[in-house]
Image: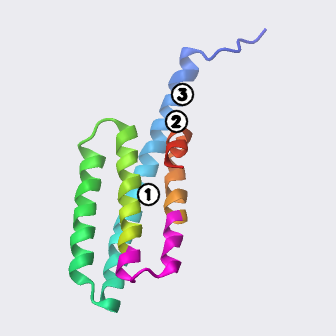
Amino acid sequence: MQQLLPTKELDTNIKAYLENVQIRADKMVDKFIIGFFILGLCLAPIYDTWSFSLSISSLNIIVYLIGRFAITNKFYARNISGIVLAVFMLQFIGQMHGLAELHFFFFVNAAILLMYQDWNYQEQVE
């Protein structure tokens, strides 16, 4: 009869897989953060929101880097990533003076956070 309970070997395989997922997701979120920074700079000349864009984006990137490299608890680091993505969404909405189409970034951010494959985290976001 097969053993139904996970073994230590299975636990280590699952942990290794989840660590690999975490590393890949962190790299992808890094790229999205850089892309959102560049998008904020591209939106800045439309309504001349350079100071707003540069100040919010710079602070956002500093907070993200602190969360990514200084915080050892990965759950809190993912929370900070979600907050940073949400602030970028709010920045875009503010830069475009409330343009409704930019609320779409809420769904983009939720899709980005799915890369972490942490369903406990997703339950808290909702």
Circle 1 packing at 10 Å, graded few (<14), some (14-19), many (20+), is some
Task: Identify residue type, mark 2.
Answer: Tyr
User: Relative to the observer, which residue lies in front, 20 or 29?
Assistant: 29
Asked whether, in this view, residue 111 is left or right of residue 52, the answer is: right
Task: Name the outermost residue toward the right.
Answer: 1
Q: Earlier in the sequence, mark 2 or mark 1?
A: 2
Residue located beneath label 3 in the image: 13
Q: CA distance from mark 3 to mark 2?
A: 6 Å
Question: Is-magenta flag for residue 102?
Answer: yes
User: Relative to the observer, which residue lies in front, 36 or 25?
Assistant: 36
Q: Residue 121: percent from the left, percent from the top?
A: 49, 42
Q: Residue 74: percent from the left, percent from the top?
A: 37, 38
Asked whether, in this view, residue 48 is left or right of residue 9, the answer is: left
Task: Identify residue type, mark 3.
Answer: Asn
Is the N terminus in the top left, top right, bottom left or bottom right quadrant?
top right
- Residue 28 disc label: 1
C-beta proximity under 8 Å, tags 3 and 2: yes
User: Relative to the observer, which residue lies in front, 109 or 72?
Assistant: 109
C-beta proximity under 8 Å, tags 2 and 1: no
- Residue 116 disc label: none
Residue located beneath label 2 in the image: 17
Q: Residue 110: percent from the left, percent from the top?
A: 52, 57
Find the magenta span and give its range: 92-106
The local secondary structure at tag 3 comes to helix
Q: Residue 27: percent from the left, percent from the top?
A: 40, 54
Q: CA distance from mark 1 to mark 3?
A: 23 Å
Instruction: State the image quarter where residue 119 is shown.
Output: top right
Q: CA distance from mark 2 to mark 1?
A: 17 Å
Q: What's the residue at 27%, 89% (across, down)?
A: 48
- 106 relative to 125, above or below: below
